[in-house]
Amino acid sequence: MYQKYKNAELVKPGGLELKDRLVGVQRVTKVTKGGRAFGFSAIVVVGDETNVVGHGLGKSKDVATAIAKAVEDAKKNLVRIPIIKGTLPHEQKGKYGGARVNIIPAAPGTGVIAGGAVRVVLEAVGVHDVLSKSQGSSNPHNVVKATFDALLQLRDAKSVAKERGISLEKVFNG
């Protein structure tokens, strides 16, 4: 799922204190010759509020089962995100489908300035100070995936130094 991100560090759910947050539940209808068959799809974000987060989709005939399936799916897709002092290392844009998300680091005390699905993802990952802007599609599925696209592109100074084969000081001072 995260193959295109070279610095995405996958995490096993064992031993983590994960909290699940429901992003949205949709009632879907399949029209058959016997009438309408109702089902539900749920999108959930799980995170340990320190730097591990994942998202999942569950579908079922009833809401509770759909949410349970979504949580199980989310636990299979956990990734570690670099967070520095409660905010992000740098500004980043993410996109998925028609959704565009821009996340910007903020000074301590700013809080999470984000709406809807972006807020849920950023709170689950443990970011305390961030500015964000969501543009284009407001479909929660695409917004969550666009936010993950932005988060997975984040790199901290240590990984940049290691990738370039230079010292940490040289990254900052040139």
Image: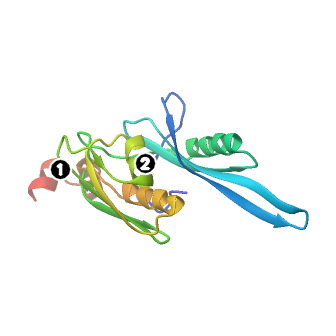
Q: Is residue 7 visible?
A: no
Q: Residue at x 44, y 35 (%)?
A: 48
Chain-order first, disc 1 or disc 2: 2
- Front position in the image: 148 or 6: 148
Residue 13 falls in which quadrant of the image?
Answer: top right
Q: Residue at x 38, y 54 (%)?
A: 115
Q: Residue at x 68, y 45 (%)?
A: 66
Q: Amino acid at mark 2?
A: Val
Which mark, by number, is residue 167?
1
Outermost residue to the right: 34
How crowded pointer 1 is (Cα within 10 Å; few <14, some 14-19, many 20+) is rated as few
Q: What residue would you read off at disc 2?
A: 121
How crowded pointer 2 is (Cα within 10 Å; few <14, some 14-19, many 20+) is rated as many
Callout 1 secondary element: loop
Which mark, by number, is residue 47?
none
Q: Which quadrant holds the C terminus?
A: bottom left
Instruction: Give the x, y percent position of residue 92.
Output: 30, 61
Callout 2 secondary element: helix
Q: Amino acid at mark 1?
A: Ser
Q: Which quadrant holds the N terminus?
A: bottom right
Outermost residue to the left: 173
Residue 93 falls in which quadrant of the image?
Answer: bottom left
Check whether the beta carbons of the residues at disc 1 and disc 2 lie within 8 A of each other.
no
Instruction: Give the x, y percent position of residue 47.
Output: 46, 39
Q: CA distance from mark 1 to mark 2?
A: 32 Å
Q: Residue at x 50, y 70 (%)?
A: 97
Residue 49 falls in which quadrant of the image?
Answer: top left
Instruction: Give the x, y percent position of residue 90.
Output: 24, 55
Q: In the image, 71: left or right of 116?
A: right
User: Of the residues tagged 1 and 2, which is closer to the observer?
Assistant: 2
